[in-house]
Image: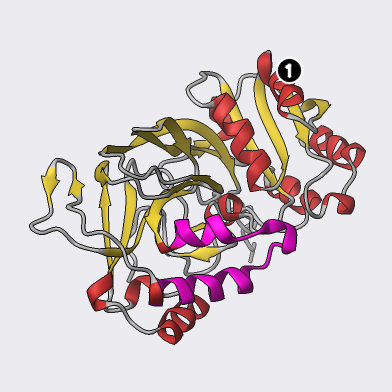
Amino acid sequence: MTVPDAAPEVAPEPRVPRGAVLASDVLDSTEATLIYNTKAGGSERSSPDHLVEALHQLGYRPVYRATDSEDDLVQALRDAEGTVFVAGGDGTIRAATLHLAGRDGVILGIIPMGTANNIGRTLGIQGEPLDVIAAYRGAAVQPFDLGRITAPWGEDVFLEACGCGAFAEVLAEYNPDDGKSPLRAVQALGTALSAFDPTPIQLTLDTVPEPDETPYALLEILNTRATGPRLRLATTADTSDGLLDVIRIDASHRDGMLAYLAALARDDFEALPSVQSDRAQVIEIPYHGQAFHVDGEVRQGEQGAVGTVRVECWAGAVQVLVPVAAPTAGAQEVGEPTP
């Protein structure tokens, strides 16, 4: 009896993240620029030569540009085309992204080399620099939202978060020169949440004002899941959904310091009874001169000032590379609801 030949084994199709397309379908150029911040934490693990060689192996033709200052970055990105790979911490990635926002035909590839790596972690980009580059083989391209602010102090853009209340106050006091310690930041936030005495405000979400003025011990508007020294306040935030996560704590109903510390350690901050979480495209916050933070920068309070801080989602401001995972046995298909 003749045994028929076995059917050839077919490799599984890669799992493309929701809202993304395979890079091979949109990239019409192998041009690439490698932005490398030699001051970033962990930069000793992989030299620029190693990263350039790894990008060559993926089929790119990278040009290496060292950026130790803002002027260097402006020069490096002025005529950049194709894919811009940024090797550095969240600060370097933020600076490069703000220069690339709104530009057509340019894709951002993140190579995290900092301490917190809030942006990379939200996108599932983690690991040693060479491992991150290897994970970009067959990568997808996904829109990345930003947050835009119009305020009495001027205009701002953020990648991670902005807000007022306890965290803004902590950030104003937090000294990175003492060492970037997520544990120290969590402890400082827990203490501030217990003691901070805010002014009541009436928040407006997508033109709908909240019914009452509320004293918010914490008011954070997040694009990524974490901000600052890896404080995961919005554990399900999606940087490509066209919405921002609004996390807040009514000061009159707050939990104790230990409850916040435990929730941050368990990674379920939003599950606390005192934490209210919503998503909105436009958020309006009455301004009474309180301090705000914009990513890792503080906008100091102005006593006696009044106005409105308007925060809106800039949907798809940047296109980013994201790793594509191969499906495993029994894996959930893209778009299938989570059980």
Mark 1 = which residue?
75
On the image, the x and y values in percent for residue 196 come to: 38, 69
On the image, the x and y values in percent for residue 269 come to: 40, 73
At 80% across and 33% down in the image, what residue appears? 68
User: Which secondary structure class fits the magenta region best?
Assistant: helix
Looking at the image, residue 55 lies above or below residue 83: below
Q: Looking at the image, which is closer to me, 228 or 16? A: 228
Which quarter shows the C terminus? bottom left
Magenta-colored stretch includes residue 35: no
Q: Residues within 10 Å of mark 1 (few under 14, many from 20)?
A: few
Tell me where residue 34 sits by quadrant: top right
State the extent of the magenta-drawn residues as a range. 167-194
Q: Residue furthest top?
A: 79
On the image, the x and y values in percent for residue 80 come to: 68, 18
Which quarter shows the N terminus? bottom right
Q: Looking at the image, which is closer to me, 59 or 235? A: 235
At 41% across and 58% down in the image, what residue appears? 333
Looking at the image, residue 6 lies above or below residue 259: above
Name the kind of residue labelled 1 in the image. Answer: Gln
On the image, the x and y values in percent for residue 228 come to: 56, 57
Tell me where residue 151 sits by quadrant: top left
Whether residue 180 is visible, yes or no, is yes
Looking at the image, residue 302 lies above or below residue 188: above
Q: How many labels does the image show?
A: 1
**Relative to 142, is 81 on the left or the right?**
right
Q: Which residue lies furthest to the left in this view?
A: 211
